Amino acid sequence: MDPYEYYTILECSKTASVEEIRRAYHKLALQFHPDKIINGEVSTEKFQQIEEAWRILKDSESKAEYDAECRQAELERENILVYSRITSKELNVTEDKEFMTYQCRCGSNYVVHKEDLEEKNNELHIPCQECTFVIIIET
């Protein structure tokens, strides 16, 4: 199953703006409205899928949550074990102030160079120094 199924249902890309999603929704809602008969059948199920996708993707907060869940599903499908999703504010500064760390549940640390955190609106995947877990740092 496609982790970004709602985008597929609305026939738009996962990078589509809210306006593009709205236009796609309106087009499909008109096309598959239950009052219309397509090939001799009422399209209630397809219309319900379109409505559900729109309900999630029209709101920026629920869209962001859905996108995060989809990214997690992609990582899990690739067998990447994600320990935590954090922000750079949750990291600890090392004594030399050049690196930032975050403690893993195995007792070891995730280490990231401070320069890597400067790019905004990015996701960094940092592996643990000892085990197979990864953290995702949202900048």
Image (cartoon, rainbow, N blue to C red):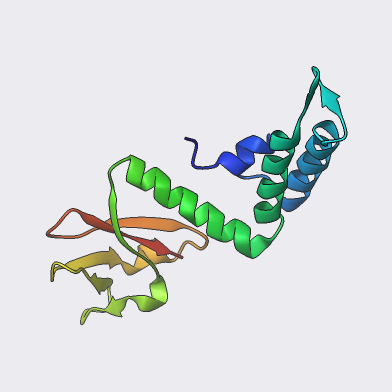
How many discs appear?
0
- The image quadrant that residue 49 belongs to is top right
In the rendered view, would you say 134 is above or below 33? Answer: below
Q: Is residue 85 above or below residue 27?
A: below
Residue 31: x and y, percent? 83, 31
At x 74% / y 38%, what residue is drawn?
47
Q: Residue at x 51, y 63 (%)?
A: 120
Is 17 placed above or below 89 here? Answer: above
Q: Most extreme residue toward the bottom, as rendered?
A: 95
Q: Position of residue 64 (x, y in %)?
A: 58, 59
Image-based side of 46 in relation to 137, left or right: right
Quarter location, residue 9: top right
- Nearest to the observer: residue 8 or residue 139: 8
- Residue 72, image x, y percentages: 41, 51
Residue beneath the point at 12% across and 59% down: 130
Specify the quadrant of the image occupied by residue 101.
Answer: bottom left
Q: Residue 121, percent across and down?
A: 52, 60
Question: In the image, is residue 138 above or below residue 24?
Answer: below
- Residue 65, visible in the rendered structure: yes
Q: Residue at position x 73%, y 45% from top?
A: 21
Judged from this view, the residue extending furthest toward the top is: 39
- Tell me if residue 13 can be seen: no
Is residue 73 found left or right of 25 in the rendered image?
A: left
Is 94 on the left-hand or right-hand side of 106?
right
Left or right, residue 42 beside residue 74: right
